[in-house]
Image (cartoon, helix red, strand yellow):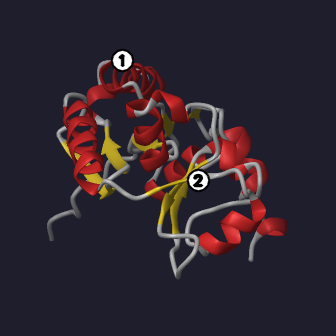
Amino acid sequence: MPSPPERSLALRKIIHVDMNAFFAAVEQRDRPELRGQPVIVGGDPNGRGVVATCSYEARRFGIHSAMSAARARSLCPQAIFVRPRMDAYRQVSRQVMEILRRYAPLVEPLSLDEAFLDVTAATADGVLAMQIAREIRARIQRETGLIASAGEPFNKPLAKLASDCPYPMPYRNLGYWFLSRFLTLDNAI
């Protein structure tokens, strides 16, 4: 009877890249007068509009995606509401995804502003995934003028969790220390 195929015990190296406050960041990049201002991208606050995203300046007031625009206006009356420019966001997204494909053949976009990269092969010669993530972030900022976050643990859910840690921590490596404390039986749901 043939023996079962050997399974690699090597951990996958997955990086999750997430563009920070993407739509609002594109608006602030393209319209310098919006920089440093509470910017809300979404619908009309005088109607039934919804917040698509907002700048970090607006988030300080408790505003978040999927909130009604009217509620956002009540939380931050000085907020600047901007209608979405989906063509502009798609263009920047294509540029970011092109950058990601320079580092990994397997790029799995999740939305316009985030993707998983499997950099296992790129790390086979000893390059650390952390180095790749830092280089990706620097290239995205240099080529697009935007900031990205990156998380790099052992699998997709943890990579996303790592990149979703509070801004402005731009790079997260959830190593064994974090996993041993976060994923204990006491923390199990």
Residue under label 1: 142
**Looking at the image, residue 83 lies above or below residue 47:** above
Q: Which kind of residue does numbered mark 2 sit on?
A: Leu
> Which residue is the extreme one toward the front?
46
- The Cα–Cα distance between marks 1 and 2, rounded to whole angstroms, is 25 Å
Secondary structure found at label 2: helix
**Quarter containing the N terminus:** bottom left
Q: Earlier in the sequence, mark 1 or mark 2?
A: 1
Residue occupied by mark 2: 161
Say if residue 67 shows up in the picture: no
Question: Relative to the observer, which residue lies in front, 50 or 184?
Answer: 50
Q: How many marks?
A: 2
**For this view, does 23 lie left or right of residue 77?**
left
Residue at x 52% of width, y 30% of height: 33
Which residue does the image show at 58% across and 70% down from the upper left? 45
x and y percent of residue 104 in the render?
23, 35
Does residue 32 appear in the picture of this structure? Answer: yes
Q: In the displayed structure, does residue 127 sit left or right of residue 189?
A: left
Residue 123, quarter of picture: top left
Residue placed most toward the observer, 189 or 54:
54
Instruction: Give how far across and how far down residue 21 sits, in percent.
Output: 52, 46
Q: Residues within 10 Å of mark 1 (few under 14, many from 20)?
A: few
Dividing the picture into quarters, in which one does residue 135 lie?
top left
Q: Quadrant of residue 61?
A: bottom right
Residue 159 percent across, percent down from the top left: 50, 48
Q: Is residue 72 above or below residue 60?
A: below
* Callout 1 amino acid: Arg
Which type of secondary structure does the marked residue at label 1 adopt? Answer: helix
Which of the two marks, 1 or 2, is nearer to us in this view?
1
Name the residue located 80 percent from the left edge and 66 percent from the top edge.
187
- Disc 2 packing (10 Å; few <14; some 14–19; many ≥20): some
Q: On the rendered image, what quadrant is the C terminus found in?
A: bottom right
